[in-house]
Every structure is written in C-alpha cells, then in structure tokens.
Amino acid sequence: MAGVKEGQGQLVFGLDIGTRSIVGTVGYLSDKKFHVLAQRVREHETRAMLDGQIHDIVKVGQTIQAVKEQLEEDLGRELTEVCIAAAGRVLRTVTTHAEQEFEEDHEVTEEDVYSLSTLGIEQAYEEFQGSNDLDMKFYCVGYTCMRYYMNGYQIGNLVGHKVRVMSVDLIATFLPEDVVDGLYKAVELVGLHVANMTLEPIAAIQVAIPERFRMLNMALVDVGAGTSDISITKEGTITAYGMIPVAGDSLTDILVQHCLVDFDTAERIKQQAGNRESVEYQDIMGLTQTITAEEVEEVLAGKVQEMTALVAECIRELNGDKAVSAVFVVGGGGMVPGYTERLASELGILKERVAVRGQEVMQNIQFEIENPRRDSMMVTPIGICLSYYEQGNNFIFVEFNGKRMKLYDNGRLSVADAALQCSFPNEELFPRRGQALTFQVNGKSRMVRGQQGEAAVIRVNGQAADIYTQIHNGDHIEVLSSTVGERASLELGKLGELSQRLHVVVNGTKIDLPKTAFVNEVLENEFYAIREGDQIQIQNFYTVEEIAEFMDVPLGGKILVNDTPAMPGTRVYENFTLDWDIHGEPAYEELAEENYEEAPKAGSGEEGRDGQGKAAEMLTGEDGTMPGTKSLEEKEPGNGSKTTEGDVTLPVTVNGQTVLLTGKNSYIFVDVFSFIAFDLNDPAGRDIVTQLNGRQAGYMESLKSGDVIEIYWKNRNEKM
C-alpha cells in the first residue's frame, strides 16, 4: 500500500456504510484528480443493516472499527474525521428558488454563492417542515444547485459577475432523524467525527456522470444491497433524486430458498454467477451442489423484472413521466446478469444505452495502491470522498447547558443557533426591562420604561462568549439567563410639564409661579411616587387668591384681570395681567360671601369645559351675569332666540365663522371661549388680543346677536 506523501494535501476519509459491506477509501485531490492512497472492504458478519438503515449500531460500529484500523495501518497515521453517505430510504426532496438582493451593483464572490446556497437550504427546510405531515423529524442530507440566475437571467457561474439580484434553483434532500442518527452513532463509537454527510446518489454521480455529460437527459441507478438510489440529469444539472427499497438482498433471499443455503453462501453464488459458467457450493445438509450461471439468471429473472419495473417507474416519475435517453448503473446489485437488459426493456430504450459503469468513469481517479478494485462497487465510495470538496452540509454535536444536541452545520453556527435549536427562550438571551409604568397626563397616555437588566452570561468551553460566538463540534455551551431590571418609577416633580413655570404680571411685576398637579383629583407634592394607572392633571392656572398667598401679600380691592374686574376666585392663566389696590378694601366682599363658589379643581370640571370657560362660570351669577349687573335680556330685550325655557341661542361671528352660543339666557364675552377651539394651555404668543366689533373688548362685556369677535395671540397674529 502507498504511504502518506509530503505535500500531498489534506487527506479525505470516505466510508460507504452499505447493507452488505463497508468500504473505506482514503485519498486527496490534486490537479483535478483524486488520488486513492488506501482502500479496504469488509462485509458485515451479521445482517446488522437492512434496506440501507442500521439495525444494530454496535455491530456496525465493530465492522467500521475493523476497516478503520486496516486503513490506519496502511497509511501509518490515525484517522479522526470521516465523510459518510446515507441511502435514500424514506427519501423526501424539495425544489425551491432562493434569491438575494443588493442595494447596488455587487461583485459576486465564492462566499456569496455559498451564502446563497445556504439560504436556499434553509428555505427548502422551512417549506419541507410546513408540508411534512409525518410524525418524525427529518434532516437535510444533501442538496444540488440546479441553476443560477444573475439579475433574472440564467448563468453557469455567478462568481466574478456584478449583480443587483442573484438567485438559485436548488433541490434539497431529506431523510428521517433515525437514519441519520444511526450513521452518526456508529462512526462515533470508534472515535470518528463526521466531516461531511451526503446522499448516496449524490456521491455516485460525482464519479459516474461527469459534468460534461449532464447536458444529456440521463439517469444514474445505484443498486446496493438494500436500496436502489436514482438521480436524473438534464440541461447540465441534477434535477431529481429518488429511491426504491428493493435491491441486491432481495435477489440473494431468492437464492437462499432455491439452493437451501445460508445468506452468505447465497450472496457468494450471486456474485460468482456473474463471471463464471457454474458455481459449486454446499447446502444446509452438507451436500455439495453445482448451479450454472444460466440457472441463476432464470431463478432471479422474475425478481429482476420486478426490480427493474419499479426503477423504470421511478425514473419516469422523476423525469416528467417520460423515459431518459440513457442509464448508468453502479453498485454490486446492478452486476446481476440480465439486469441492464431488463431495465432497458422496461424503459423502452436500446439495451446499449443502459450500462454498468465502473472503470470507464474513473479516468480522473489515480490509484496509488496495488491491485486496486475499479468496478462499479467502488464508484459510490470514491464519490463520497469527492463530495467533501463540493459541499459541507454535515452535522455537529454540542452540549448546551448539559444537554447533548445535534445541529445542521451551515459553516456559520453560533451560540444563538444552538439556543434556538434547544428552545432556549429568546428573551432570556438579552437584557430584560423591568415592568413599565403607565399613567395619564392631562388625558393622554404616558409610559416610563423599566430599568434594563443584565445580559445572559455565556461561556463556550469555559471561556467568556456572546450569542455571536462561532461554535464547533464537541463544544460545551453554558448560558445563564439574562436578568430582569427594576420596575419603572417616577416622582411627580420629574414630569416635564412641572418643570415649566407659569408667567403672570402682578401689579406691573412679572412673576414665575410653579405649576401644580392633581393626581386622581387630589393635590400632590413633587415627591409623590406615581403609581400604575394614575390620572394626573397639570394645573395651568392660579386663582387671584392663590397668587396673593404665594406672594405672601394681602389681597386688596379693585381686582383686575386683563384690565377686567375680577374676584379672588378668578383664574389667572399664562401671560395674564393681575392688578389690585393693595391699600384698598377687598372688592366684592359682600357679593363674594353670597355668590362665590370655590373654583373647581383640575380634573373635576363641569361638562368638560376648561380654560376661560370655567373662569366665566365663576364670574357670572345664576342668571349668567356678573353679580350686581343687569341681565342681557333686561338691557337688550329681544336679543337672540329662546330655545328652551329661559335659554337663548345667540349667533355671533368669531374669526370669520358663525358660532351659536347656547345653554344660557344671556352671554358675556368670556362665554365665547366655551364654544371655540382656543387652547389656553398652549400659548402661541405673549398675550391674547380680544376685539368686539372692531374695538378692544372686556371679558365681562355683554354680547348681542350678530356681534363680530376677533380672538388671537399677540405677536404671532394667529387667529384661532
């Protein structure tokens, strides 16, 4: 056997774990040729595998161990990584189209193509999961990029082209979890790590049908012991995969019954009948018997016809209900006499166009060993090695918080991928905020977020990491959940509205008044801790009496608000002027005792009125007039039209629009504020301009039908 040479490149160990035997191949790729350095074959001592699936993991592992040790002896080095292939038992395929768009022209790299393929695989898996109604978990074990597109046009190779949109038509293959797990566990028993996993027909086609032949509509049939795996090529690519669970072992079973021998003896008879005129054997009675190759073919003819009919039917189904132009057959089961002729007949094509392929397709395989085996049984094992260079779609095993798990390796696995696969709560990876605080300010919802917690503590193999840390086979991942921050809290005085001041002019001096607030209709100080659901009303006025108390001065007589006679309970808003005679007697003292009612607190207003509308109610008596004055009806009989008992509807013009004043039997100027959209809480100027019929108006002036009123903020001249 040839030993390892210096500078020969990375060795690839391929293992074909078949139903009847295990074939191990080790070699390397150089100058577009694969150099085989060692090759060993060992049959199972028992029927540990059936129909391509492992039934006895331990016994299969023992056979793998024997093959591995022989190869290591040949090479003079230890083998730790292996490439494997799965048979197509319970095979499922998904064909999908994936695309990636760039913001501007982008030159495509090999990494971009790999990312596009990965995107297609993930998309195919999602589609498969959505349509799979079987009660079992599947894994993607192989894929083929059928066609690439550049800006919507098909192209052979994307690398180097500038594109805005690149896309791919991709076919992905899926097998059940138990099939995949059985293969992984068998190789892990002997200390091997899976470097790559593919599907047997994908591996076989790497050798059997070179790319230059894939423009033809052809089929490859890999007839093993337990399954017959099928792939179709057309227009330069692989277009479909399929499988039937009937192959060489079903033929051997017939010889067991016909010749009365054990399975191994029947298998030998089947193999030798392919190249001998007769085969000698001993039956179970110990008697020596002889069977001719012609008799073997006759005994197996019925089963061969059944097998080829199933294969032909599968080929047609995969190829759009029509036969292919030619078929290549590989695998030991395909060497049974009469197989290729019968398959050609079932497909309705010339028998010369169905052929067993072995040495003929190994032109790019360089054997560095003595007496190498170059028949069709070696096609798939070598193809498994070559698949290593085509795609890296293996699985890895990691430990996540003490739980062993398997991940599909797309080459970019991170801690976040492992957490997702393990159903670790996504929110426990990131800092979590404490409970928010919600309340209302002046009828509008307000929210304060809770404090941010600490991020999850992540370690990979004992080293500090984060969710983006790349992970590899055998890694130990520990994730301590993130923490929840403190719940939100806020003192009343921290509200932005309370940081503003109320500006008024008192007896010619401008003063700033701190704003106050009612919480759930109760006056609270600035240190009050706001609670969930609190209703907060910011007070945007002071009464005349409250201003005097704040200034700590006596309230004298002749009170004027904006040059209009007022009372101690009159409300004073932003930029209002307030004057009183500090040496005079209190004004309206006797009337105040009889008629004055305490100004309604913020949040408890009547019928939703606010601002100057409430001020007007305080300044007027029960009949709507200022105490001590006559009603409008007495002064202006017939003014307006009565609607209900004692009520008058009074039409006036405000800023060019007709406004109907209703609900009272007489009206003064300040009543207008209750019927127009004029926000006293949001000053748009230094002072308010009020005009009645072209002249300066007083707030207490009586109104009559047809009056023309102008109201706007001074400086900005914005009419409301």
Image (tube, helix red, strand yellow):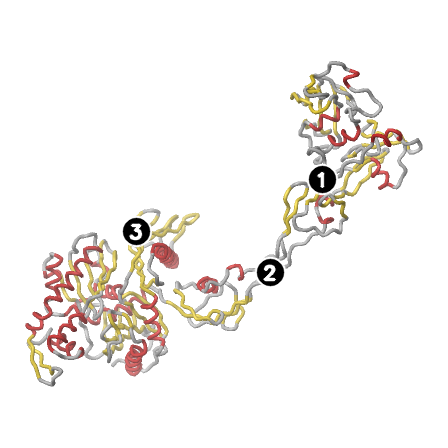
Badge 1 or badge 2: first in the primary sequence: 2
Inter-mark Cα distance, 3 to 2: 52 Å
The structure residue drawn at horizontal position 71% and vertical position 25%, both measured from the top left corner, is 672
Badge 1 or badge 3: first in the primary sequence: 3
Against 606, residue 69 (above or below) is: below
The residue type indicated by label 2 comes to: Val
Badge 3 or badge 2: first in the primary sequence: 3
**Which of 178/367 is in front?**
178
Residue denoted by label 1: 603
Q: Which mark is residue 155?
A: 3
Residue 667 appears left or right of 384:
right
Eye-nearest disc, 1 or 3? 1
Which part of the image, by quadrant, shows the N terminus?
bottom left
Tell whether label 2 touches label 3 (CB within 8 Å): no
Tell whether label 2 touches label 1 (CB within 8 Å): no
Residue 238 appears left or right of 538:
left
